[in-house]
Image (cartoon, grey):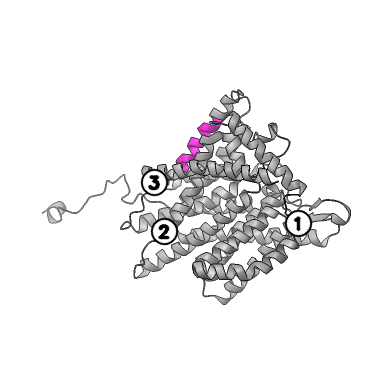
């Protein structure tokens, strides 16, 4: 009797096709770790190692090749689609501005510096362990930045081992603002990155039983706050306060949040008093309000497609100092709605995971770990949005990396717990898009109100 007659219902595998098509690509993830370290730590831009070779771009290409050839299945979500659609609207913005693709440098940067990294992190972060490794690299980058800042602060000329500090003002009013290299060359960029990593340090603090890891997390948190103070970035100060407020609200609830907020007001007042002047009479604030007014005029003139990505400075002497105004004026109402939909979907995914019911057993423990991660990642996004309202960082790479963290976690939960309805439908995206379009009106009203009281 033949084998098939003995077990007629047993599936037979094709001898040329594997029965399991899933491949997590460990070496591809290793390359992603190297790429993450290059992006965040940037050793190739330190004076001792500085080179003209395109190391970062090379590793991005190599990692993407391994993503295409060794990772299966590939991952895609609504946010990735939105980013691709935004790319085409950026091209339309160039055509509307009658540049007709004469210089697409800014548009192609959207692909290489935002879309591709988002896809890579979305695809390779197939486990919580992998995501923790990437988060650890991010925290180590912050420690290195603050260490470099410590050298800048300790030197009368602001000389650090990687970069020099920036001095604002002159004479007795001169203030040293620390900075790092590469995409963190501006104190605002460095400050924003430190703000977004505060919740990551919190996550490691509350999700470990190791005394050493807890002490290390507390030390890193302290270093992050000191680093933010040294940057002198007022937007980062606001972002750090927003992160603390969000953590208190999530950790203690609404009532305790109100009580603790009231009790902490004196501390906040002292922090604000020791920081750079914040007030409507400040020249920097006046310049920002003027730039926001120009942004309104720009979107009125070209409401649909705007003036083109990274073109604000071509029509105004200073940057907008507001990521929302930047997108509104450069990409128009359509581009702004797409970008804001991308952001709001982050909070939609984090909220859905946080509200999932508890289940028993090992799978329940894994779900609780994903829920905790998403809580702290959403707090990091609150830090970004709060800081981004005062600086123009609409297309900064690390924001899209953090967005991929949330998206990757959501897809892991969606795959591991099919009993929950976690599919994001077109109707959900449409509702979020309507809210995004409505936020444009709210942004306009806020700016108009600030202009009337300045």
**Residue at disc 2, secondary structure:** helix
Q: Nearer the viewer, residue 150 or 246?
A: 246
Q: Nearer the viewer, residue 440 or 411?
A: 440
Q: Residue at x 74, y 56 (%)?
A: 232
Label 3 environment density (alpha carbons within 10 Å; few <14, some 14–19, many ≥20): few
Q: Main secondary structure of the magenta part?
A: helix
User: Pointer 2: what residue?
Assistant: 353
Q: Is residue 114 magenta?
A: no
Q: Residue furthest right?
A: 171
Q: Is residue 441 left or right of residue 10?
A: right
Circle 1/circle 2 CB separation < 8 Å: no
Task: Please state if 84 lies on the left or on the right of 59 as rendered.
Answer: left
Task: State which tag comes first along the sequence, 3 or 2.
Answer: 2
The answer to whether the residue labelled 3 contacts the one labelled 2, judged by CB atoms less than 8 Å apart, is no
> Given the current orientation, which residue lies at the most extreme bottom position?
211
Residue wearing tag 1: 276
Give the residue displayed 34% in from the left and 67% down from the top. Answer: 359
- Mark with earlier residue (1, 2): 1
Looking at the image, which residue is at 59% across and 75% down?
212
Q: Nearer the viewer, residue 270 or 64?
A: 270
How far apart are the two marked residues, 1 and 2, measured between alpha carbons?
Answer: 39 Å
Q: Are marks 1 and 3 in contact (CB under 8 Å)?
A: no
Q: Which residue position is annotated with label 3?
A: 428
Q: Is residue 126 visible?
A: no
Residue segment shown in magenta: 80-91
Percent position of residue 383, x then y = 59, 56
Where residue 234 appears, as percent x and y from the top left, is 70, 54
Callout 1 crowding tier (Cα within 10 Å): few <14, some 14–19, many ≥20 = some
């Amino acid at each position: 009797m033949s084998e098939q007659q003995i077990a007629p219902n047993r599936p037979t595998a094709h001898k040329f096709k594997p029965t399991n098509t899933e491949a997590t690509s460990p070496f591809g993830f290793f390359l992603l770790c190297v790429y993450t370290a290059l992006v965040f730590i940037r050793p190739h831009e330190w004076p001792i190692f500085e080179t003209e070779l395109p190391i970062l771009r090379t590793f991005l290409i190599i990692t993407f090749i391994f993503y295409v050839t060794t990772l299966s299945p590939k991952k895609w979500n609504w946010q990735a689609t939105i980013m691709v659609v935004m790319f085409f609207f950026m091209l339309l913005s160039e055509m509307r501005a009658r540049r007709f693709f004469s210089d697409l440098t800014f548009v192609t940067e959207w692909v290489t510096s935002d879309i591709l990294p988002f896809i890579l992190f979305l695809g390779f972060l197939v486990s919580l362990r992998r995501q923790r490794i990437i988060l650890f690299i991010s925290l180590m980058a912050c420690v290195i930045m603050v260490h470099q800042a410590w050298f800048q602060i300790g030197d009368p000329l602001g000389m650090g081992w990687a970069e020099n500090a920036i001095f604002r003002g002159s004479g007795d009013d001169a203030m040293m603002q620390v900075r790092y290299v590469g995409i963190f060359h501006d104190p605002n960029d460095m400050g924003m990155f430190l703000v977004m990593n505060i919740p990551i340090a919190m996550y490691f603090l509350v999700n470990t039983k190791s005394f050493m890891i807890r002490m290390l997390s507390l030390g890193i948190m302290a270093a992050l706050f000191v680093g933010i103070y040294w940057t002198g970035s007022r937007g980062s100060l606001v972002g750090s306060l927003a992160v603390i407020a969000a953590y208190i609200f999530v950790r203690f609830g609404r009532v305790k949040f109100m009580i603790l907020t009231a009790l902490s007001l004196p501390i906040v007042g002292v922090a604000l008093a020791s920081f750079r002047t914040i007030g409507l009479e400040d020249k920097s604030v006046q310049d920002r309000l003027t730039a926001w007014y120009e942004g309104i005029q720009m979107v009125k003139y070209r409401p649909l497609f705007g003036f083109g990505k990274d073109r604000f400075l071509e029509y105004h002497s200073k940057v907008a100092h507001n990521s929302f105004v930047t997108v509104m004026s450069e990409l128009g109402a359509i581009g702004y709605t797409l970008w804001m939909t991308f952001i709001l979907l982050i909070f939609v995914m984090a909220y859905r995971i946080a509200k999932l019911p508890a289940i028993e057993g090992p799978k329940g423990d894994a779900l609780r770990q994903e829920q905790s991660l998403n809580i702290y990642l959403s707090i990091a996004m609150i830090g970004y949005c709060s800081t981004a309202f005062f600086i123009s960082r609409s297309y900064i790479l690390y924001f899209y990396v953090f967005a991929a963290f949330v998206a990757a976690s959501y897809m892991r939960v969606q795959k591991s717990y099919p009993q929950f309805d976690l599919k994001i439908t077109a109707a959900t995206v449409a509702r979020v898009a309507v809210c995004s379009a409505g936020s444009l009106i709210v942004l306009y009203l806020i700016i108009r109100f600030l202009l009337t009281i300045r």
